[in-house]
């Protein structure tokens, strides 16, 4: 289904509710630059660390696209766990994983309230940005604790620049991308307002500091387009 959520005047902040979930795959495809390539790279790098029996979590798994793609592109026997606190998203995730014949355990809960343990890989693409600062730092420590020694955390985030001139240029280029994907200026501005104080991006340096402070030994950026980036951090 085509995303038309912001084609009308908005009355509330952005939420991962039934309306957003019903068009979410199209929304991500047209709102996250190179979404499929970022996901392919996340899976390629995860695969380098996975073995038979490895446990993999996806925090903020939405409609389970990443775990389903991982399963299709990995010939190892994995324990896949998808966590999301949106019931509407997990309904889609359940239906999609059944249709693709992929066995995933879904947990409908706040990431903070779920025990993470013995993970070889933890994914969290475009989800940390929705967690309040300070809480976000605590969550990354929890992720670190949930990984086995040598395990990896693969995450993607929208970034902000410390330089206000460049930051405006990055955002302008992103909005040009959205226009090219068929979103109108009205839809773009309605969504921008709805995301205000809901999606809080960090700079690249802030992300690296958060990862280092949590105890990770190394962090590498594996993909970047303007203000969107994917990182891999090793425990
Ligand atoms: C931008 S989407 C993630 C997209 C997904 N990772 C992908 O690549 O297709 C963010 C997701 O995080 C979930 N989420 C946000 N905060 C959460 C929290 N505190 N606990 C659990 N899920 C959360 C939302 O419901 C939403 O489905
Ligand atoms: O549309 C935007 O402005 C975005 O920032 C894209 C973005 C994201 O980066 O997570 C925001 C909300 C939706 O979850 C999908 C994508």
Image (cartoon, grey):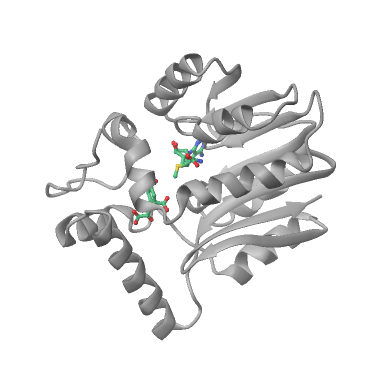
The residue at 74%/21% (across/down) is 77
Q: How far across and down, in percent of the image, does residue 212 sit?
A: 75, 62
Q: How far across and down, in percent of the image, does residue 57 sit?
A: 65, 33
Q: Residue furthest right?
A: 149
Side of 163 relative to 144 (left or right): left
Q: Residue 142 falls in which quadrant of the image?
A: top right
The answer to whether 40 is drawn above or below residue 233 in the figure is: above
The residue at 76%/31% (across/down) is 117
Q: Residue 47 falls in which quadrant of the image?
A: top right
Whether residue 15 is visible, yes or no, is no
Q: How far across and down, in percent of the image, does residue 46 sit?
A: 70, 42
Whether residue 122 is visible, yes or no, is yes
The answer to whether 190 is drawn above or below residue 102 in the figure is: below
Q: Quadrant of the N terminus?
A: top left
Q: How far across and down, in percent of the image, does residue 73 sit?
A: 63, 32
Side of 118 relative to 224 (left or right): right
């Amino acid at each position: 289904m085509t995303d038309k959520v912001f084609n009308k005047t908005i009355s509330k902040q952005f939420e991962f509710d039934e309306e957003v979930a019903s068009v979410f795959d199209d929304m991500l495809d047209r709102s996250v630059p190179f979404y499929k390539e970022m996901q392919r790279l996340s899976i390629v790098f995860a695969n380098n660390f996975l073995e038979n029996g490895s446990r993999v979590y996806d925090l903020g798994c939405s409609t389970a696209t990443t775990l389903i793609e991982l399963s299709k592109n990995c010939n190892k026997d994995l324990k896949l766990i998808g966590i999301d606190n949106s019931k509407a998203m997990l309904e889609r995730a359940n239906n999609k994983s059944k249709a693709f014949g992929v066995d995933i355990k879904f947990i409908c809960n706040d990431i903070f309230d779920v025990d993470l343990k013995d993970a070889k890989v933890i994914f969290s693409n475009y989800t940390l940005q929705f967690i309040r600062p300070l809480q976000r730092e605590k969550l990354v420590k929890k992720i670190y604790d949930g990984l086995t020694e040598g395990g990896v955390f693969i995450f993607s985030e929208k970034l902000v620049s410390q330089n206000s001139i460049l930051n405006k240029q990055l955002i302008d280029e992103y909005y040009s991308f959205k226009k090219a994907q068929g979103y109108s200026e009205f839809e773009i501005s309605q969504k921008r307002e709805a995301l205000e104080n809901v999606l809080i991006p960090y700079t690249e340096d802030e992300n690296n500091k958060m990862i280092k402070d949590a105890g990770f030994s190394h962090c590498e950026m594996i993909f970047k387009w303007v203000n969107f980036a994917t990182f891999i951090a090793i425990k």
